[in-house]
């Protein structure tokens, strides 16, 4: 039972006026490849919890960044981000990236 080491994603804030592209984001991501739960589901769940806890706001890390930092494939990272957008925890703005939904836009809230 080999378990992937927890890694941290730290993305610097993007340049600009700061309205849409907020502060740096940090999330602890730990994917257990032996759990029987697909990696994209684990990743989406951990990102969802980070959004709920207020650890991730504004622009989320790109699929490429998530892939490089966690060791999962880029398609797995993209699928996790699609799950979040499908559930309403994130929105996609073409040309800018994926953004965490604001508290008033959370599902069930």
Image: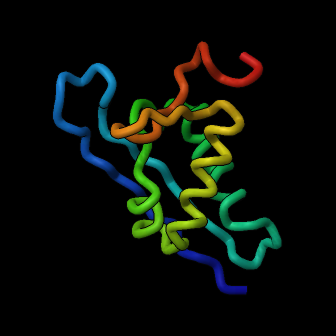
Where does residue 89 sit, x and y in percent of width and height? 62, 33
For this rendering, which residue is in front, 70 or 78?
78
The percent coordinates of residue 56 (x first, y second) are 47, 37
Q: Quadrant of residue 79?
A: bottom right
Is 66 located above or below residue 23 in the figure?
below
Residue 27 vs 51, above or below: the answer is below
As drawn, the residue found furthest toward the bottom would be: 1
**Residue 83, how many percent across, how many down?**
67, 47
Q: Is residue 38 left or right of residue 51?
A: right
Quarter containing the C terminus:
top right
Residue 33 falls left or right of residue 28: right
Which residue is at 24% across, 24% downward?
Answer: 18
Residue located farthest toward the right when viewing the structure as drawn: 36
Give me the residue at 69% from left, 76% from top. Answer: 33
Which quarter of the picture shows residue 57?
top left
Q: Residue at x 82, y 72 (%)?
A: 36
The total number of labels drawn is 0
Q: Nearer the viewer, residue 101 or 57?
A: 101
In this picture, residue 69 sits left or right of residue 103: left
Q: Position of residue 6 (x, y in %)?
A: 52, 67
> On screen, 21 above or below 9?
above
* 108 to 46, vertically: above or below: above
Pick the quarter of the image with the N terminus.
Answer: bottom right
């Amino acid at each position: 039972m080999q378990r992937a080491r927890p890694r941290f994603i730290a993305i610097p804030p993007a340049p600009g006026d700061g309205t849409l592209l907020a502060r740096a984001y940090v999330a602890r991501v730990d994917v257990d490849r032996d759990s029987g739960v697909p990696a994209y589901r684990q990743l989406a769940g951990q990102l969802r919890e980070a959004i709920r806890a207020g650890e991730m706001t504004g622009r989320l890390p790109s699929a490429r960044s998530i892939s490089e930092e966690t060791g999962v494939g880029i398609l797995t990272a993209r699928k996790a981000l699609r799950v979040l957008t499908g559930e309403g925890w994130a929105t996609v703005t073409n040309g800018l990236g994926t953004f965490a939904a604001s508290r008033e836009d959370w599902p069930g809230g």
